[in-house]
């Protein structure tokens, strides 16, 4: 059985029990604040436990011996399956295209703004 210890994790010290990382509620709240995620009152402790479990699983995966496993980048054997990019003549003229557009201005299609000013 592994013993308990303290270790450095990101922005502070965390408690390791039986080799697993145990995040503190304050650390989860700090990360949530950095990510602009609003946590309800009391969710910090809940997510600290859940994230600690995830990190514990990652810790277990890091202990797996992969020395005899070949590196794998992809398994399909396919490479660059996209169609070629080439220029071809249009079936309609620019003027006809602009006539079909819902709104046009100064030779361009006019669309609604997607950004607030």
Image (tube, grey):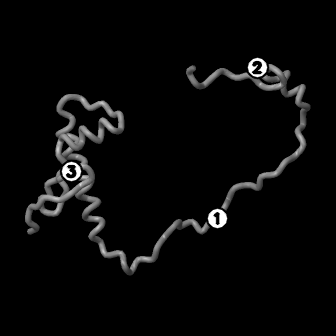
Q: Residue at x 25, y 48 (%)?
A: 51
Q: CA distance from mark 1 to mark 3?
A: 44 Å
Q: Residues within 10 Å of mark 3 (few under 14, many from 20)?
A: few
Q: Position of residue 39 (x, y in %)?
A: 26, 32
Going from N to C along the chain, the mark reached first, 1 or 3, is 3
- In the rendered image, which quarter is residue 21 located in? bottom left
Q: Quadrant where the C terminus lies?
A: top right
Q: Residue at x 12, y 62 (%)?
A: 18
Of tags 1 and 3, the one toward the viewer is: 3
Q: Identify the secondary structure beneath mark 2.
A: loop
Q: Residue at x 58, y 25 (%)?
A: 115
Mark seen at residue 79: 1
Q: Position of residue 111 (x, y in %)?
A: 70, 23
Q: Quadrant where the N terminus lies?
A: bottom left
Residue to which mark 3 is pinned: 12
Q: CA distance from mark 3 to mark 2?
A: 57 Å
CB of mark 1 within 8 Å of CB of mark 2? no
Seen in the image, is 89 located left or right of residue 63? right
78, above or below 84, in the image: below
Q: Residues within 10 Å of mark 1 (few under 14, many from 20)?
A: few
Q: CA distance from mark 1 to mark 2?
A: 40 Å
- Quick one: which residue is furthest to the front in this view? 11
Going from N to C along the chain, the mark reached first, 3 or 2, is 3
Q: Position of residue 9 (x, y in %)?
A: 24, 55
Q: Residue at x 31, y 75 (%)?
A: 65
Residue to which mark 2 is pinned: 102
59, above or below 69, in the image: above
């Amino acid at each position: 059985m592994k013993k308990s210890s303290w270790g450095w994790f990101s922005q502070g010290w965390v408690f390791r029990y039986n080799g697993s990382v145990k995040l503190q509620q304050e650390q989860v709240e700090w990360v949530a604040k950095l990510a602009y995620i609003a946590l309800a009152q009391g969710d910090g402790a809940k997510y600290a436990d859940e994230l600690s479990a995830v990190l514990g699983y990652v810790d277990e995966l890091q202990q797996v011996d992969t020395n005899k496993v070949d590196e794998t980048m992809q398994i399909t054997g396919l490479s660059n399956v996209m169609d070629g990019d080439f220029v071809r003549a249009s079936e309609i003229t620019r003027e006809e295209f602009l006539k079909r557009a819902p709104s046009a201005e100064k030779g361009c299609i006019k669309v609604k703004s997607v950004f607030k000013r």
